Image (cartoon, helix red, strand yellow):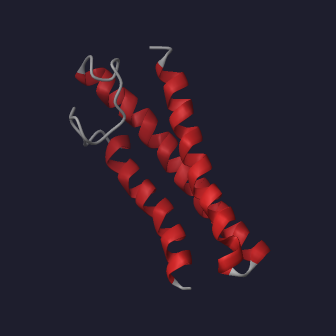
Amino acid sequence: MVLVPFLFVGAPVVIILLALPLIFGMVPRNRWYGFRSSKARHSDEMWYRANRLGGTYQAVAGLIELIGLGVIAVAVGDPSRAAWWALGDVLVPFFIAIILWRIHMRRY
């Protein structure tokens, strides 16, 4: 049962680590890594702006996930009972970050 908490804590950490190169503008335009939309692919300036914003939302979502997992661990206690709550805690902030990014990108 040690694997379940490790996976749920590892997911937000990976999300945060993947966001850092996007925030710092280290990822050039490509087809595989980053927040892509037709507007983001229009120019290098838009690519870096879109990915800085998306990476920031993603990092904040990862931090919210870590805090939420800590609250769930304290409130529920038993990792086997907390698994479904933890899954929701990991997925919901991530999808909210994507939705906020899409809304913000419509303004450009």
**What percent of the width, then of the height, locates residue 27?**
24, 41
Q: Give the residue displayed 31% in from the left and 47% down from the top.
A: 21
Q: Quadrant of the C terminus?
A: top left
Q: Quadrant of residue 34?
A: top left
Q: Quadrant of residue 100?
A: top right
As drawn, 56 above or below 101: below
Report the residue that reaches farthest toward the top.
Answer: 108
Q: Is residue 101 left or right of residue 46?
A: right
Q: Is residue 56 left or right of residue 21?
A: right
Q: Quadrant of residue 97?
A: top right
Figure disc tally: 0
**What percent of the width, then of the height, locates residue 77?**
74, 80
**What percent of the width, then of the height, locates residue 69?**
64, 66
Q: Give the residue displayed 64% in from the left and 62% down from the top.
A: 67
Q: Give the residue displayed 24% in from the left and 24% down from the top.
A: 44
The residue closer to the viewer here, 96 or 51, is: 96
The residue closer to the viewer here, 89 or 1, is: 1
Q: Give the residue displayed 27% in from the left and 16% down from the top.
A: 42
